[in-house]
Amino acid sequence: MIVEANTVRFDSITLDSGATLAPVEVAYETYGELNAAKSNAILVLHAFSGDAHAAGISHESGKPGWWDNMIGPGKGFDTNRYFVICSNVLGGCRGTTGPGSINPATGCPYAMRFPVITIGDMVRLQKMLIDWFGIPRLLSVSGGSMGGMQALEWAVSYPDRVVSSIPIAATTRHSAQQIAFNEVGRQAIMADPDWNEGNYYGKQLPGRGLSVARMVGHITYMSDDSMREKFGRRLRGKENFGFGFDVDFEVESYLRYRGSQFVNRFDANSYLFITKAMDYFDLTGGRASLAAALEPARARFLIISFSSDWLYPSYQSQETVRALRARNCDVAYVELLSNYGHDSFLVDVAEQADMVRGFLSSTFEKVQ
Amino acid sequence: MIVEANTVRFDSITLDSGATLAPVEVAYETYGELNAAKSNAILVLHAFSGDAHAAGISHESGKPGWWDNMIGPGKGFDTNRYFVICSNVLGGCRGTTGPGSINPATGCPYAMRFPVITIGDMVRLQKMLIDWFGIPRLLSVSGGSMGGMQALEWAVSYPDRVVSSIPIAATTRHSAQQIAFNEVGRQAIMADPDWNEGNYYGKQLPGRGLSVARMVGHITYMSDDSMREKFGRRLRGKENFGFGFDVDFEVESYLRYRGSQFVNRFDANSYLFITKAMDYFDLTGGRASLAAALEPARARFLIISFSSDWLYPSYQSQETVRALRARNCDVAYVELLSNYGHDSFLVDVAEQADMVRGFLSSTFEKVQ
C-alpha cells in the first residue's frame, strides 16, 4: 500500500495563548475508505516525534508508517472496515505549520516567533481537519504517549464529536519527572551555539544539542530490562576496553547513532515547542478534581498502559481510569505485560492490536 | 568540628590501562583518633561528584561534609570510637591528581592526556594512602553509589586489608542503562564548543554542556515520587504559564540552578574520566560468574539498597548478596524503604545510620 501525504490550508487558527496563526496548514494521510454514512472514521494521533505517515509505504520515502503494525487490512485498526486519518501535529516539522514554516509577516521561518502551543491547540487544528472532511463524529480517536494525551483532550473538548477514545501509555498531566526530562532536552538544544536563538534555518543545524536531547529521550523510551537484553555490557567492534572516549559499548554506539539520525529528520525548534505543549498539558486545569475536569466526556474509553513503561507509568493511566469511573464513564482498562518500556505501544503490539480490534468492533456495532 | 584537607604525594602509580602517573597526589580528611593498635580505621568512599570533605565543617569553605549526618560523635560512623578517613578519588578535581592537574612532562594540565582510569585504580591509590598511614587492616570500607563499588573492589582486591565492607546503593557492574545515562552526560560535555577537546583550563569553561549533564544526573538521583512531592507541577514565580521558554515550573528552575552551580565546583574532564571508570566497572571481569569473581573476598558485608532507587535498583544489590552467599560469605542485606531515590543514602539516613552503627560495633568486637 503506497500512500501519499496531502495538505489542507485554513485561513487561521486562534490558540490557547491568545495568539493567532494565519494561515495554518495541516498535513495528513488516510487509509481505507470513508463509508457513505461517514460513521467509520478513526483519527490516529502521533507521539512526540511522529508524523502523518502512520501506515503503508510512503511514496516519498519508501518507508513504512510508524504504526504500520497496527493499521491495515485485518490489523488492530482494520482498514477493510474503517477509514483511518493521521495528521502531523501543529508545531511539527513534517508538513503541518510549525516553527520552521514561513511567517507571512516576515517572509522568513517563524523560528522562536512561532507562538507557544498546547495539546488543546493541536486538537483544535485536528478538529478543523475533521470538519473539512465533513465527518460529523469520529468512531474513535487513538494514539500513544502524546497521541494518547490528544485522545483524552478530544474526549473532553469535543465530546459530541467522538464515539470512543483509546489513550495508550498516556497521562492527563505531565509529572515533575516528565517535565524534567523534557527540560533537559530543551536545555541541550538551547546550549548549542548553532541553535542561535532559533535562527539556524539555511545554516548549520544545532545537531549536537538535538542529538544529546534525543539520546536522553531514547533511554526513557526503553526499559532497564530491554536495554540489558538488547545491549548488556557488549563492546562495539572491540574485544577489550579502548581506554579512551571513542565508543566502547554497544549501547553508546546505538545512542550516538540514533541521536545523529534524528538531526536529519526533526527540527530542533519543533522539539522545543512540542515538548513545551506536553509539559503544559493538564486536563485538570483549574478544576477541583480530575473527575470534575472529565465531566464533559461522553465517549467510551479503552485505556492501555504497559508494565515496564517508567516514563508514562501505569499509575498515571490508572488515575485516568479512576476519574472516569467516578463520572460513571464507560471505561475499559488493561495493563499489558511487556519488557519494551514506553516503546511497547510501537513495537510490542500483538495483544494491543487484539484489544483495539475488539473494542472498535463493539463500538462500531453500537453506532450502526 | 572544623576540619582541613591534607595531601600526600607518592612517586607514581601504575594503572589498569598499563599507563603510569608520576607523581600522584591524594587529598584526604580524617575524623576521630586512630587507636594504638591501629584497629579502628574506617575508609569512607565518596560518590561520583563527592570529595574528601565527608564530615565536619570545612576550614576552607565553611560547609559541612557530604556525609556529615553519618559521620561524627555518636553517629553511624561514630568518631568517638573510630578513626574515619575519606580521600578524593583519582581523576577527581578536589585535591587528588586528575585531568586538571599539571602534567610534569608539559607543564600544562593533563586535560585529555590524562590516562583513562578504573575503579580498581582509585582503590589502588587509596591502598597506598592506607599503607602510608601504617594501618594494617581497615575495620571497614564503606560508601554509596560509586563509593559502594569501591567498597566491593576493596574486598576483592585487598581481602587481607579489610575486616568488613559496607556497599550502599551500588552494583558489581554498570548496566546498559547506567552506561547510557553516563554517555549522555559525556556527549553533552563534548558537544560544548568550549570543551575544546578538553583544553579549556584558564579559558571559558564548558559550562553549558556540564550543566546539561548535571541536570540529567539530578533526575536519576531523585525518584518520580520525590520529584512529585518536592515540585509537582508548581509554577515558579508566576500564576500562569508564561507561553515562552523562560522557567515555567519549579522543577525547571531547580534543575537549571543545580546545573549552573555544578559548573563552579566540578571539572568537566573529571566528569568524563570518572564516569568512564564507573562504566568500565565489572567485578566479574573475565570470570565464569560473579560468585567466582568474589572468591578472594574474606570481609563481612553489610549491603544496603533503597526501595525507590531506580538508578542503582535493589535487584543489583541482591545479585551481589546472592553471589556472596554462594561463596558462603558473611553478608547481611537490607532494603530500606525511602522515597528519595538514589539520593536516599545521603539524605534519608536515620535507619541507615542504625544499621551501620550496629554492624560496625559487632565487627569491632570481633577484632578486639
Image (spheres, coloured by chain):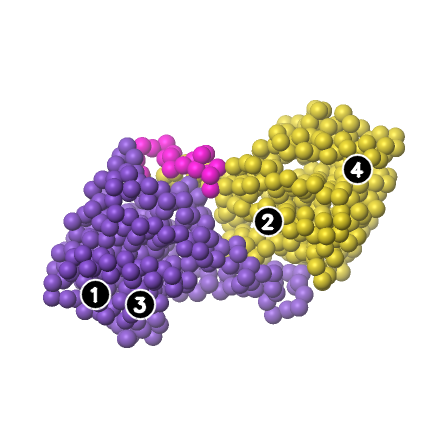
Chain colours: A purple, B yellow
* Label 1 crowd (10 A; few <14 / some 14-19 / many >=20): many
- Which residue type carries mark 3? Lys
Q: Nearer the viewer, residue A212 or A65?
A: A65
- Type of amino acid at the residue the image marks with label 4: Leu
State which tag comes first along the sequence, 4 or 2. Answer: 4
- Contact, CB < 8 Å: mark 3 with mark 2? no
Left or right of residue B292, residue A365 in this image? left
**Cα distance in 3D space between marks 4 and 1:** 73 Å
Magenta stretch, main secondary structure class: loop
Please tell me how crowded label 4 is: few (under 14), some (14-19), or many (20+) other residues with Cα within 10 Å. Answer: many
Q: Identify the residue position indicated by label 4 in the image.
A: B139
Dot 3 or dot 1, earlier in sequence: 3
Tags 4 and 3 touching, CB below 8 Å: no
User: Exactly how many numbered labels are in the figure?
Assistant: 4
Q: Position of residue A148 (x, y in %)?
A: 32, 52
Q: Residue at x 33, y 65 (%)?
A: A70
Q: Which mark is residue B315?
A: 2
Q: Secondary structure at mark 3?
A: loop
Judging depth in this view, the residue of B188 and A176 nearest the camera is A176
Callout 2: SS: helix
Amino acid tagged 2: Tyr
Q: Are the two marked residues, 1 and 2, in contact with CB atoms closer than 8 angstroms?
A: no
On the image, numbered disc 3 is attached to which residue? A75
Q: Residue at x 88, y 33 (%)?
A: B37
Q: Position of residue A281 (x, y in %)?
A: 31, 44
Residue A83: mark: 1
Q: Is residue B232 magenta?
A: yes
Query: Residue, x 70% and y 52% (percent of image)?
Result: B323
The Cα–Cα distance between marks 3 and 1, rounded to whole angstroms, is 13 Å
> Mark 2, residues whose alpha carbon is within 10 Å: few (<14), some, or many (≥20)?
some
Instruction: Find the distance from the CA under tag 3 to the CA under tag 2.
Output: 38 Å
Q: Amino acid at mark 1?
A: Phe
